[in-house]
Amino acid sequence: MPELLKAPLVVEFPFTRSLGPVQSAFLTGLRERTVLGVKTSDDKILVPPVEYDPVTADELRDLVEVGATGTVTTWAWNPEHRRGQPLGKPFAWILVKLDGADTALLHALDVDGPDAVHTGMRVRIRWAEERTGAITDIACFEPYEGEETSEAAPHDGEFEDKVSGIVAPARLDYTYSPGRAASAYITSVAERKMVGERCPSCSKVYIPPRGACPTCGVATREEVEVGPSGTVTTFCIVNVKAKNLDIELPYVYAHIALDGADLALHGRIAGIPYDQVRMGLRVEPVWTEGGRYPDHYRPTGEPDADYDTYKELV
């Protein structure tokens, strides 16, 4: 039985969004060391502000300035710092109701340990030295000995050079284990062989194998070597450069039905002008020296496959 594989993987993309007048004013205000909330129809002050009343769904536009000090309503200790978290050391997550607000804001509290934080303690904002119009303009909160210092006051939300949009990076780090069937497939590809598995019920050969037939739902065990040549069943022309992928644009990505397989896999097509790639094109894999998988597929020079031979795999 082949060794089960595992590897760290990261899924990451930047999420870009524009801001409406309320969120724009809130983030611009943080840049200017001003915390803004919004007033609802029943005179509650929401911080952070939202653009629509969570109860009535009415549009909200009445901005108010609240204090930079507040009271902890609940908390949790964070004993180990993780990527992207503030402070770079253990800290407390807190919900803090700023003076003048009716709802609580989630942020970090800089204290030495869990014994130094409690519900009801007074805290104040520690502003970041460099502020850009983001929630991180509040570097963290810190203990504060004073009493409530201010009430909410109307604010017009007007600032110079207002923040109009934000980029929020989304990222997921995880360890992936492909399982028995996929581990065997990855190992065979590294040996420059394409090995799928045959369903004992319908006799279809799947590559990459998943350990079970997606049609019959039964386990697959019989290994079948397919290809290495195959047929382009469909394709797309890529005109947008991907991060960390050094390939000249445009290029072609295709579904390829390897000879003897009943499922098309995908791969890049090279060795031919992008506008000459076509359905039915016969291709073969190209490995680079030391590569563990085909770098791309290139034309074999054979005549194109007849559509009837691959139409079920389009």
Image: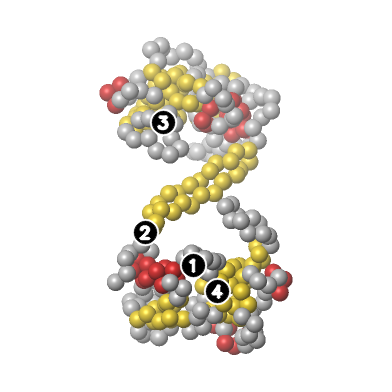
Discs 3, 4 touching: Cβ within 8 Å: no
Q: Name the residue beneath numbered marker 4.
A: 285
**The residue under label 1 is which amino acid type?**
Tyr
Seen at 55% across and 74% down, the residue is 285
The secondary element bearing badge 1 is classed as loop
Q: How far is mark 3 from mark 4, CA to CA?
A: 47 Å
Which of the two residues, 3 or 260, is positioned nearer the viewer here? 3
Q: How far across and how far down the image is residue 302, in percent? A: 63, 85
Camera-side mark, 3 or 4? 4
Seen at 29% across and 71% down, the residue is 1
Numbered badge on residue 6: 2
The secondary element bearing badge 4 is classed as strand
Camera-side mark, 2 or 1? 1
**The residue under label 3 is which amino acid type?**
Gly
Label 2: few (<14), some or many (≥20) within 10 Å?
Answer: few
Q: Quadrant of residue 119?
A: top left
Instruction: Tell whether 275 sits left or right of 11.
Output: right
Q: How far is mark 3 from mark 2, CA to CA?
A: 29 Å
Seen at 59% across and 30% down, the residue is 133
Rendered view: 219 above or below 241: below
**The residue under label 2 is which amino acid type?**
Lys
Query: In the rendered structure, which disc, 1 or 3, sits on the residue that comes first in sequence?
Result: 3
Which of the two residues, 40 or 202, is positioned nearer the viewer here? 202
Which of the two residues, 65 or 242, is positioned nearer the viewer here? 242
Q: How far is mark 1 from mark 3, CA to CA?
A: 39 Å
Q: Name the residue beneath numbered marker 1.
A: 293
Q: How far is mark 2 from mark 1, CA to CA?
A: 16 Å
Query: In the rendered structure, which disc, 3 or 2, sits on the residue that comes first in sequence?
Result: 2
